[in-house]
Amino acid sequence: KNGDLYPKWAHKHWVWLSRYDESQDGLLKMVEGFKSRDIPVGGVNIDSSWTTGYSNFIVDKTKFPDMKAFIQKLHDQDIRVLAWVTSMVNEDSSNYKEGYDNGYYMNSGLTVKWWHGEGSFVDYTNPEAVKWWHGQMDRLLDIGLDGWKCDGTDPYIQEFIFPHGKGGYMSAHEYGHMYYNDFFYYTKSKNPNALIMARPTDSFRYKDLVAVYYNFQERDTSFSAWVGDQDPTFDGMKNAIANFMHSAWNNYINIGSDIGGYRSGHSKDPLEKKLGRSRNLFIRWFQMGSICSLMENGGNGEHRPWIFDQEYGTGTETVDIYRQYAHLHEELGEYFFTIGNDAYHNNVSTIQPVSKYSIQDPFTWGWKLGDDIFTYPILSNDSIIPELKFPNDTNTWVDYFDPSTKFPGGTILKNVKFPINKYPIYKRAGSILPLRVQNDYVNHGTKDFKDHLNFHVTAPFASKGATKVLDGEFITKASYVFDRNRLIFSLSPTKENVIVTFRNTGNLPKSILVATSHSKKAFVLHETTSSLVSSNLPGYTISLHPKLTNTYDILVRLPKSMENLEFLLETY
């Protein structure tokens, strides 16, 4: 059902530490490090070293002395918790013999070597094996775990040539779908707000010459899909984006990547080798990650922005940039959630590649996120994009951070360079973005917006626009039509107070008239004088934007109402 497919915490900012560095205390200190710098955290992933044996579900108390208290402490901060897992039980795990003796493994317990040892695959076609497996999952689910990071061991089953279980023979993809579906749906039966993080389409590359793309989970569970492990290089980022594109062409829903790349140590530069990646790469990757439906930061080496500032001697610049883009991501959460639900029902992805389909890398690297946001990645250390191609459409695309800069669809910019704090993100002129504004870091609004639903209308004097916000089965719809200086904005019943922001550039109109259906009155909101005058009418204000050049905002505040509301904006 609309709004009930998956929880909204899928679109929060997630963080984690690799198995080499993680512990209960270390993860809590990392979360505090982000939050103390006013960087929001909504999810924590526990990596693969949390058990005493791979897939025995017994917590290693030397690393996590009180897992229940750990999970509860994060829940108290409105942070959800996932744990790494596979369907592979290692021979040296404490539960292996029980599974083997009872015939709970594929191919009669035949083993395969994988990156964490040697083990057997759980047989999902055996009801008794599934019951046994669920009982072990319950050790974590019963103390509040919110989901799982299901890692991609399932292709290893191809080594059996003819995989089979109690229910007969199957393909590797059929086995993989059972693996991911069981973790998703069983966990959701215990916790309706559960998620899994698993691969959509990932690639196996040979010397960056040939890529073989492989689909992992089914799309119906891909609400938090990460595209596998990449090198901490700009080529690694390029590989992640190629996986984005192929995942989108395969209609996976919400897609992201390990910010900075999962792997580390690929540089001869002493500082980069120490940190696992360069500061430039890290910044460009988290900026890209902020405009993905899934924003998650973790892996081998260093991923904490303040450590990059310490090591590079850059004051608080990395932290300041990270803070802005993490808030951008979280404030766009309602937009991500809306397009995620629409993508599921329409059998498409939230990512719309500008490139036509390619069996290898895309022909151009930009993509739209839904219909209203376009971005193009920065894929080199010099921050130059050789050829930035906008979608070949009839839209006008407005710079997200400088509304006075606009480009018609089909524009191609050559050799454009971006400063380190700026990323190429654009809004469609005329779009309505549903937002949850928390502060002024992104220039969406101010702290006064915090307890309101915000509809942000960019360059509103286009022909029309529409959006919606989902809250379970309750849907709030917002739309407008514009003709001859008259804009009529319509709002369906809403459970919340609403702020509608109309952002435009250029000179202020000589006058703006607002008439609302609930007041049955018309107000002159603003008349231009020698100096700016703000309306003293309650609920309606107009002001020049304090941070954006040549930009003004018209704000209309509306109370929550179970009636349809409509107001007219007329400019002269």
Image (spheres, helix red, strand yellow):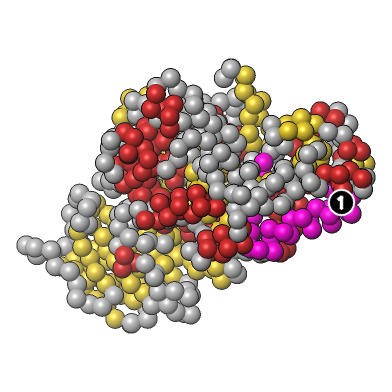
Screen quadrant of the N terminus = bottom right
Q: Callout 1 environment at 10 Å: few (<14), some (14 to 19), or many (20+)?
A: some
Q: Where 23 falls versus 194 (above or below)?
A: above
Q: Position of residue 12 (x, y in %)?
A: 49, 55
Badge 1 element: helix
**What residue do we see at 79% from left, 46% from top?**
94
Q: Which residue is mark 1?
A: 129
Q: Position of residue 295 (x, y in %)?
A: 49, 47
Number of callouts: 1
**What residue do we see at 39% from left, 70% from top?**
451
Q: Is 137 contained in the magenta span? A: yes
Q: Position of residue 566 (x, y in %)?
A: 39, 73
Residue 79 visible in the shown view: yes
Name the residue type under label 1: Ala
Q: Is 461 contained in the magenta span? A: no
Q: Where 269 falls versus 68 (above or below)?
A: above
Q: Where 266 falls versus 198 (above or below)?
A: above
Q: Is residue 263 left or right of residue 482?
A: right
**What residue do we see at 58% from left, 41% from top?**
19
Q: Where 198 falls versus 545 (above or below)?
A: above
Magenta segment boundaries in residue numbering = 122-151
Q: Position of residue 88 (x, y in %)?
A: 76, 41
